[in-house]
Image (spheres, grey):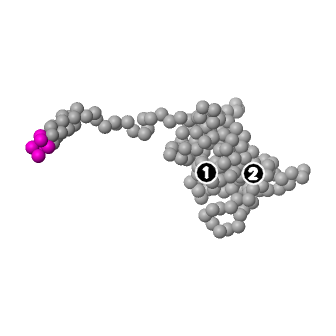
């Protein structure tokens, strides 16, 4: 028994010496660790939220990345559908909270039936248009449905039709891609 007591005393002594020489806990935070913005093949890595630059209105807009949505969506008001020369057309203004764009006209590329997971309402038919956007350094033309999203936090929702072709999503991060620099506004000389 005396032998075990001596071993226990030595163990405690060595533990105390080791504790004095222990290295301090790291002070590195998650923000200090660089996070990749692209895969090796060039695809974007998107966080759960990103900035989307819409060139038509020269504005960076907050977007939620939604892998459950098929088609991307953008907030629009004054949506007016009509036919011109046998083609479906739409007039609309992009808008959310404190900003509203000028009136745009675009051909309707197709129609989608949107089923809200959070409601029992019948699905709504929405027009789909092509829109030039940029996320980080990636410029593309992508499909967007037009719908009033003014009651929602994010004016833009990026769905799978964009993600599947262009990106992967890492929901543990937000705003991995930088905002796009706004185009200089031109002033007409008087």
The magenta stretch is: 1-6
Residue that mark 2 sits on: 128
In this image, 149 relative to 125: left or right?
Answer: left
- Percent x, y for residue 47? 55, 44
Q: Quadrant of the C terminus?
A: top right
As drawn, is 109 to the left or to the right of 179? right
Name the foreground residue: 25 vs 178.
Answer: 25
Neighbour tally class for label 1: few under 14, some 14-19, many 20 plus, Cα within 10 Å: some
Numbered label attached to residue 66: 1
Q: Secondary structure at mark 1?
A: loop
Q: Quick one: SS at disc 2?
A: strand
Q: Position of residue 128 (x, y in %)?
A: 75, 51
Q: Which of the pair 159/1 is nearer the observer?
A: 1
Q: Residue furthest right?
A: 85
Q: Is residue 13 left or right of residue 54?
A: left
On whether residue 56 falls in the magenta region, the answer is no
Task: Work out whether residue 106 or residue 70 is closer to the camera in this orientation and state it.
Answer: 70
Q: Is residue 105 above or below residue 115?
A: above
């Amino acid at each position: 028994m005396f032998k075990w007591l001596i071993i226990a005393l030595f163990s405690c002594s060595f533990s105390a010496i080791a504790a004095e020489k222990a290295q301090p806990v790291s002070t590195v935070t998650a923000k200090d660790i660089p996070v990749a913005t692209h895969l090796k093949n060039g695809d974007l890595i998107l966080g759960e939220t990103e900035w989307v630059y819409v060139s038509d209105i020269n504005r960076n807009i907050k977007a939620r990345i939604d892998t459950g949505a098929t088609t991307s969506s953008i907030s629009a008001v004054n949506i007016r559908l009509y036919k011109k020369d046998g083609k479906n057309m739409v007039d609309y203004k992009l808008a959310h909270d404190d900003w509203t764009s000028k009136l745009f006209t675009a051909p309707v590329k197709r129609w989608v039936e949107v089923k809200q997971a959070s409601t029992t309402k019948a699905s709504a038919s929405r027009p789909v248009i092509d829109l030039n956007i940029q996320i980080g350094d990636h410029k593309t033309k992508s499909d967007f449905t037009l719908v009033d999203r003014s009651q929602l936090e994010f004016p833009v929702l990026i769905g799978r039709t964009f993600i599947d072709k262009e990106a992967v999503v890492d929901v543990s991060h937000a705003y991995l891609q930088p905002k796009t620099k706004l185009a200089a506004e031109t002033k007409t000389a008087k």
